[in-house]
Amino acid sequence: MVTNVTSFGRSGLYDWVVQRVSAVFLLLYILFLVYVFATTPDMQYEDWQALFSGNAMRIGSLIALLSLCAHAWIGMWTIATDYLTPKMLGGSAGIVRFLFELVCLIVLFIYFVWCILILWSI
């Protein structure tokens, strides 16, 4: 088992549970949006703005965004620890894996901040 400071939780089980719970919440969020689109076929900007200007939808969207970031981070960390190994890359595997994780973290942070700015500016 890989124990690394860059993992999301203390154990693989914790990461697994976070990833599954985040996936369920994202599914529910997407199903809600599909329902809204299905019941409002002629949705205009004002309808979209009214939907996302409520605090309940903003909080739900924020939780969905946090779930997406946690889910993505755990997935990318798992890919990095499974495939960017010394057996695959030789002695530079640790540096390559660290740089890969750093890029993933920076991209997730930028997306998170960008989405927050969009969400709370409506």
Image (spheres, grey):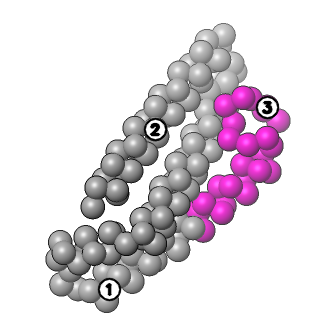
Residue type at tag 3: Thr
On whether residue 114 falls in the magenta region, the answer is no
Q: Is residue 33 left or right of residue 65?
A: left
Q: Which numbered disc, 2 or 1, marks the residue closer to the eye?
A: 2
Nearer to us in this view, 89 or 49: 49
Nearer to us in this view, 96 or 116: 116
Q: Which numbered disc, 2 or 3, marks the residue closer to the eye?
A: 2
| Residue plotted at (19% across, 75% down) | 46
Q: Which residues are magenta?
A: 1-24
Q: Residues within 10 Å of mark 2 (few under 14, many from 20)?
A: few
Residue that label 3 marks: 3
> Mark 3: which secondary structure?
loop
Nearer to us in this view, 95 or 68: 68
| Residue found at the very far top of the displayed protein | 91
Label 3 to label 1, Cα distance in Å? 45 Å
Residue type at tag 2: Phe
Location of residue 52 (image quadrant): bottom left
Residue that label 1 marks: 38
Q: Residue 120 at what x, y percent from top left?
A: 34, 56
Say the numbered circle drawn on residue 109: 2
Location of residue 12 (image quadrant): top right
N-terminal of the two: label 3 or label 1?
3
| Residue plotted at (40% across, 38% down) | 110
Label 2 to label 1, Cα distance in Å? 32 Å
Which quadrant is home to the N terminus?
top right
> Mark 1: which secondary structure?
helix
N-terminal of the two: label 2 or label 3?
3
N-terminal of the two: label 2 or label 1?
1
> Mark 2: which secondary structure?
helix
Tag 2–tag 1 contact (CB < 8 Å):
no
On whether residue 18 falls in the magenta region, the answer is yes
